[in-house]
Image (spheres, rainbow, N blue to C red):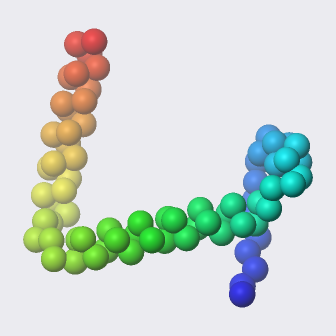
Amino acid sequence: MTNMTLALPTELIGIMKKYKDIKWSEVAREALWDKARKLELMDKLLSKSKLTTKDALEISTKINEAVAKRHRLL
């Protein structure tokens, strides 16, 4: 197994020190596995997609505009 070194904010270190009984390396390992699995699934789902980068940017712009409009109305 490979080791990994992380830079953590001081505030997070303080919280982690309060909970010494937690195996933080296991928490990190589970979070990394979760993210990796999601990326693998995304790759699998998108492998057959015909959506281009241009299409994705156009859709993103429309979504952003709709969200901004909705928040202005609230």
Q: Position of residue 44 (x, y in %)?
A: 28, 76
> Considering depth in this image, is 54 or 41 the residue closer to the camera?
41
> Considering depth in this image, is 1 or 6 the residue closer to the camera?
1
What residue appears at the point 10 percent right and 71 percent down from the top-left corner?
A: 50
What residue appears at the point 87 percent right and 54 percent down from the top-left corner?
A: 21
Q: Position of residue 11 (x, y in %)?
A: 79, 40
Can see residue 13?
no
What count of labels does the image hold?
A: 0
Classify 56 as above or below 37: above
Task: Give the position of the C terminus as an image quadrant.
Answer: top left
> Considering depth in this image, is 44 or 61 the residue closer to the camera?
44
Among all residues in the image, which is located at the extreme top? 74
Task: Give the position of the N terminus as an image quadrant.
Answer: bottom right
Classify 73 as above or below 4: above
In which quadrant of the rendered view does residue 5 lie? Answer: bottom right
Among all residues in the image, which is located at the extreme bottom? 1
